[in-house]
Image (spheres, grey):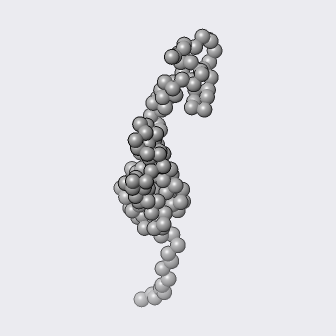
Amino acid sequence: MLTPRTGAGPAKSDIFGPVRRGWSEDGDVPSRILSWLTRPWLLKALMIDLRLAARLLREPSVPVWAKSVLPLWLLYLVSPIDFLPDVLPVLGQLDDLALAYGALRLFLRVSPPAAVAFHSAALAARRPFSRMSPADVVIDAEFRPR
């Protein structure tokens, strides 16, 4: 049951962010749910990470072993083996979502930092996909004047 706050002071914080006025400070589930639902930047950050991962999957400078993280997660998702069975009402789906987010973050972490920076800047500037130009390729040639 929700109990209204009685103090007139500022709202205190917990590990999930500031406690909203009108909700109890003892960690009610509704206050935690509302604290996450009032943060639309979380969904925006997730969408940016997904777009970045899609661009990095197409980038040839990202090694194949790094690109294999996401397909391995998809293989886990369709396999009948599960950490927590899906017959448990909420926990079965939550472990799949947690592993999906973990696989996404792992892929972004093991991707080359130069490729991540290049494609992050391209996403911020809303440029269409283009491959990174290799910085370590040197074309050695002789100049012959006519």
6 versus 107 height, above or below: above
Occupied quadrant, residue 67: bottom left
What residue is at 47 percent from the left and 26 percent from the top?
A: 34
Report the quarter where the C terminus lies: bottom left
Provide residue 24's location: percent of width, then percent of height: 56, 18
Provide residue 107's location: percent of width, then percent of height: 49, 57
What residue is at 40 percent from the left and 58 percent from the top?
A: 75
What residue is at 51 percent from the left and 60 percent from the top?
A: 111
Residue 33 visible: yes
48 versus 143 height, above or below: above
**Count of number-bearing discs:** 0
Occupied quadrant, residue 71: bottom left
Foreground residue, 120 or 67?
67
What residue is at 48 percent from the left and 53 percent from the top?
A: 103
Instruction: Judge from the rendering whether residue 19 lies leftward or rightward of residue 62; answer left or right.
Output: right
Residue 122 visible: no
54 versus 88 height, above or below: below
Provide residue 134's location: percent of width, then percent of height: 47, 70
Provide residue 142's location: percent of width, then percent of height: 48, 86
Foreground residue, 139 or 29?
29
